[in-house]
Amino acid sequence: MNGDTGLYGFFPENKKARGGKMKVKGILVLSLLLAVLALPLLANKSAVSIEAPAAVKAGEEATIIVKVNHRGNSSLHYTKRLVVLANGKEIARWDFSSSNRPEAADFSREIKLKIEAETEIVAEATCNLHGSAGPASVRIKIAE
């Protein structure tokens, strides 16, 4: 043998073919690795925003709209929960499942709440795969 015997020491005439296959495998492995590492960048946690009046008269009803933003609404990837609190007490909750998903990836829910004193509204939605982007909050004050 002349020292140029290829990867396995046999069949030196196939060295080019094996080298080409190794390059293709290397490129595939590298591509797969990059795709896996990029997944967190594509992950979308469920996020919420709240629309509510800044102030209402004591005893009046306030309309609160909670908007959920999420990039996914399939049986494998969906918003699994939306919870709304008023001054720390749960006032509304929607639980979803793979067979009972929200109507769309981005959706909203409306709540009517009688306001007696200054009230903090906190809402949070959770993705079944990636979790929550965190709670959103607004404060409704009493108008004089």
Image (cartoon, rainbow, N blue to C red):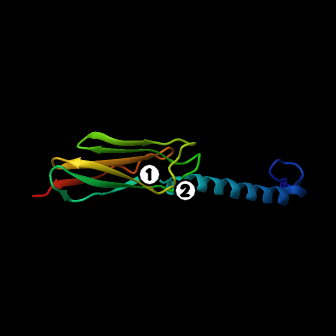
Local crowd size for mark 2, using a 10 Å CA cut-off: few (<14), some (14–19), many (≥20) = few
Question: Taking 132 as reference, is 99 left or right?
Answer: right
**Disc ID at residue 46:** 1
Mark 1 and mark 2 lie on one chain; the one further toward the N terminus is: 2
Residue shown at the point (18%, 58%) measured from the top left: 55
Question: Taking 107 as reference, is 98 left or right?
Answer: right
Three-letter code for the amino acid on which mark 2 is drawn: Ala
Q: Which residue is mark 2?
A: 38
Vertical arrangement, residue 57 with respect to residue 94, above or below: below
In this orientation, which residue lies closer to the viewer: 50 or 63? 63
Q: How many marks?
A: 2
**Disc ID at residue 138:** none
Q: Quadrant of residue 91?
A: top left
Which structural element holds mark 1? loop
State the image coordinates of residue 128 (x, y, percent, origin top left).
50, 44
Three-letter code for the amino acid on which mark 1 is drawn: Ser
State the image coordinates of residue 98 (x, y, percent, origin top left).
56, 43
Residue shown at the point (50%, 49%) measured from the top left: 102
In this orientation, which residue lies closer to the viewer: 134 or 67? 67
